[in-house]
Amino acid sequence: MKNKALLPILAGFFVMGFGDIIGTVMIQVKAECSAHADAIAWLMPVFAYCWFALISIPTGLMCGRIGRKNAVLASLAVTVAAMFLPLAASAERWWIYVAAFALVGIGNTIIQAALPALMSNVVEPAKLTSRISLGQFVKAVCAALTPVFVYLTATALGNWKLLFPLYGCLTAAAAVWLLATDVPDERRCGAASAPQTTFASCFAMLKKPYVAAMTVGILFSVGADVGFAVAIPEYLRNVYRVDLNLAGMGPTVYFVAKTCAAFLGAIVFAKISAAACFPWCMGAGLVVTAAIPFVGTPLAFLACVFVVALMTANSFGMCMGLAIAKFPEKANEITALMVMAIVGGGLVSAALGPAQKSFGAFGIVAVLLVCLAYLLALGLFARGRE
C-alpha cells in the first residue's frame, strides 16, 4: 500500500515543478503586454514568491489541522484555478496574469511545505532523503520540459497560452489520483495525542541546533542554486567574451547536471546514508568552484559547472530529509520552516550584484564559495551526529 501511495505523491512533485513556469513564460507575457512590461517584470516574481515567507508556517498549521494529504489536495485545487486564469488575460487585462501567478505561488508554497511531510507518511526515515531526491528529479524533469511545451503549444497549436489548461488538466489528474489513493493519515498513526502544530511549535524547532543548522542550510542551498543560474551567463560573457545568446544557454548545463544528480541521489541515498555523503559532495563542489577562476576556456568552465551541480544539487533534499528523519513527529513544523527559508535564499542572490560590481565575475565566485563552505561545514556537522 505504501509503495502505491508513493506514486501519486511523486506526481505531486511534477506539479511542484509548475512553479518554474514563471521564468519560462515571462518573455511571452511581456511581449503581449508591452505597455506594462516593466510592471510585469517585477510584479510577477514578487507575487509568485512572496508566499514562501507569508504562508509556509500557516501551511504547517493547516497540515496539523486537516492533515497533510488534504493540504496537498488544497494546493492542487489552487493550482488548477491558477492554470485557467491566463486564458482570460490580454494586453488590456494584464493584471490577470499577475493574479494567476500569485495563485501559482500560493499553490506552489503549500505543496512544497506539505508534500515532503506527506512523503514521510509512506517512507521509512532511513529512505526519506532518497525518496525526496527522487521527487526532486521528477520536479526537475517538469522544469526541463516546460520550455519544450511552451514551444510546442505556440507552434503546433498556435497559442502558447494553451500550456496553462494543459498543466491545469495534469494537476487535476494528479489531484484525483491522490484523492483515490489510501495514504496513511498521520493524525491517526500515533499522532492523536501529539500537540497541534502552532506558530510557536514551528519556531520552537529552531531551538534544536540540528534543525536550525539544516534550515540555514536551505537558505545557502537555494542561494547557491540561484547564484549559479545568475553567474553562469555573466561569467561566460564577462570573462570569456562569449556571444550574448550563447552565454544565455550556459545555465542549461547546470540544470541538466541537477536533473542527473537528483536521479542519482535517489539511487545512492537508498544504499548509503545521506549524512555520510553530505560532506564529500559539498567538499568536492567547493574545491571545483574554487578552481573556476583558474580555468582558461569556456568549455573547461562549463565542465566545472557541471561537476559542481552534480555534487551540490541534492543539498536541498539532504537538508530537509535529514531533519525530518531526525524528528519525524515534527515533519509539519520542519517543512514549514525550511520552505520559508527559500525566501532567505534571495538574500544570497542579492549579494551577487554588489560583489560583481566591486570585484567583477570573481566576486560572484566568492559569494558562491561562502555558500558552499557553509554547506560543507553542515555536512561535517550532520555526519558527526549520524
Image (cartoon, rainbow, N blue to C red):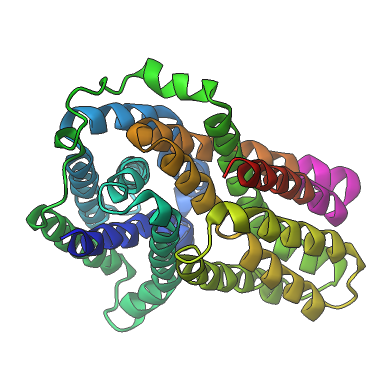
Judged left or right of residue 93, residue 253 is right
- Secondary structure character of the magenta stretch overall: helix
203 or 190: nearer the viewer = 190
Which sits in the foreground, 103 or 159? 103
User: In this picture, is 28 found above or below 109?
Assistant: below
Report x, y in % for residue 113: 36, 40
First to last magenta residue range: 353-367
In magenta segment, residue 356: yes
Residue at the image point whose x is 36% and y is 58% from the top: 18
Taking depth in this image into account, of 180 and 305 the one nearest to the observer is: 180
Residue at the extreme bottom of the image, as rendered: 156
Looking at the rendering, which quadrant does residue 3 occupy? Answer: bottom left
Determine the residue located farthest toward the left in the rendered image. 180
Counting from the top left corner in percent of width and height, residue 81 is at: 19, 48
Residue at the image point whose x is 49% and y is 52% from the top:
317
Image side of residue 157 versus residue 312, left or right: left
- Residue at left offset 17%, top offset 33%: 187
Please say whether residue 206 is one of the residues in the magenta stretch: no
